[in-house]
């Protein structure tokens, strides 16, 4: 399972499954292979920033490490950029104040908010400045809205430059150069939501699914229950039984997932940046 067989990798997953940690890990792993990588926070930027070892990310790409850059999407600035560069409006026009007013409209008109966000991601892909763009995307419950956005907008516009731009966005998402990675936990609710989202993606096919990744996977303890019962320390015995129970529960739910990669449970106390670094060590291409 190669998460880097595209120029765009969007990472999604139910809230709380470690989506931002996985996105940062994918970006780090690619950068370690000397790929020029841009990590993009599509929605809330705090999680990705923390896992990249930063307090915040800016709209302008900033270098984080060797071959690795990061940015956070600001919809008002993305709209300003879209109007100037994509629609051919003069670059000197002071559109940012107008764009901030238009952001209220973008929140209510179907597809506009999402197409501006995904449009910024695709703009960076098309700039050819990066070997790989890794986007920390919205959760699975919202991802289809973003992936559908170019087609939604194209359906609202009969023709012209804006229609052609929307069509180009949809074509770029559907191309072999774009992929979606789905992150989940081996638990009932995350697995159920992942399978529902996967069914939707397969029905509409707006983007290729490159893989599913089970996060925080526990390895078997390698000790039988009988042996655990013989452990003298009550605390150690209970810890072993808990580990065994969690492993069995994860194994049961992983059986519901199609072929998938695994990211290990990291025992001990680790900061977000350390978590991303350790997960990057586990990603094999």
Image: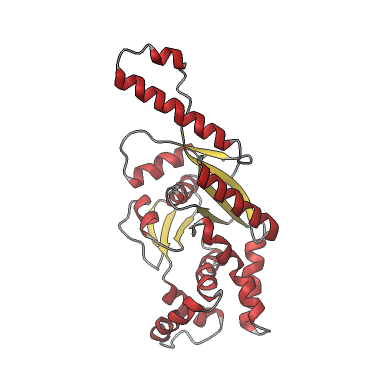
Q: Residue at x 68, y 84 (%)?
A: 158
Q: Residue at x 50, y 41 (%)?
A: 187
In-front residue for pair 39/264? 264
Quadrant that contains the C terminus: top right
Q: Residue at x 40, y 45 (%)?
A: 276
Above or below, 68 relative to 255 = below
Q: Locate residue 225: give its quadrant.
A: top left
Quadrant that contains the N terminus: top right
Residue 253: image location, x then y, percent: 55, 37
Whether residue 220 sits left or right of residue 3 in the image: it is left
Residue 43: image location, x then y, percent: 44, 63
Please say whether residue 240 is visible from this viewpoint.
yes
In-front residue for pair 207/17? 17
Residue 224: image location, x then y, percent: 47, 16
Q: Residue at x 52, y 54 (%)?
A: 12
Above or below, 91 relative to 117 = below
Residue 266: image location, x then y, percent: 39, 36
């Amino acid at each position: 399972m190669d998460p880097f067989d595209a120029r765009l990798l969007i990472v999604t997953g139910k809230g709380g499954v470690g989506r931002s940690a996985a996105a940062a890990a994918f970006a780090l792993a690619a950068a370690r292979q000397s790929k020029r990588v841009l990590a993009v926070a599509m929605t809330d930027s705090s999680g990705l920033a923390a896992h990249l070892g930063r307090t915040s990310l800016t709209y302008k790409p900033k270098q984080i490490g060797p071959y690795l850059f990061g940015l956070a999407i600001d919809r008002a600035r993305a709209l300003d950029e879209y109007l100037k560069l994509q629609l051919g409006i003069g670059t000197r026009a002071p559109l940012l104040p107008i764009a901030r007013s238009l952001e209220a409209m973008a929140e209510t008109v179907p597809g506009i908010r999402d197409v501006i966000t995904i449009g910024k991601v695709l703009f960076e892909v098309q700039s050819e400045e990066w070997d790989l763009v890794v986007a920390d995307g919205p959760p699975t419950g919202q991802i289809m809205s973003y992936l559908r956005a170019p087609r939604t907008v194209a359906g609202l516009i009969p023709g012209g430059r804006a229609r052609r731009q929307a069509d180009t966005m949809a074509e770029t998402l559907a191309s072999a150069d774009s992929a979606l990675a789905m992150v989940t936990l081996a638990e009932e609710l995350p697995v159920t939501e992942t399978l529902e989202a996967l069914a939707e993606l397969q029905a509409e096919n707006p983007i290729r699914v490159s893989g599913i990744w089970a996060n925080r996977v526990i390895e078997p303890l390698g000790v039988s229950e009988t042996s655990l019962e013989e452990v003298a320390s009550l605390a150690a015995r209970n810890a072993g039984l808990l580990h065994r129970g969690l492993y069995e529960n994860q194994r049961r739910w992983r059986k519901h997932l199609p072929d998938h990669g695994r990211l290990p449970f990291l025992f001990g106390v680790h900061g977000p940046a350390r978590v991303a670094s350790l997960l990057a060590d586990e990603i094999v291409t």
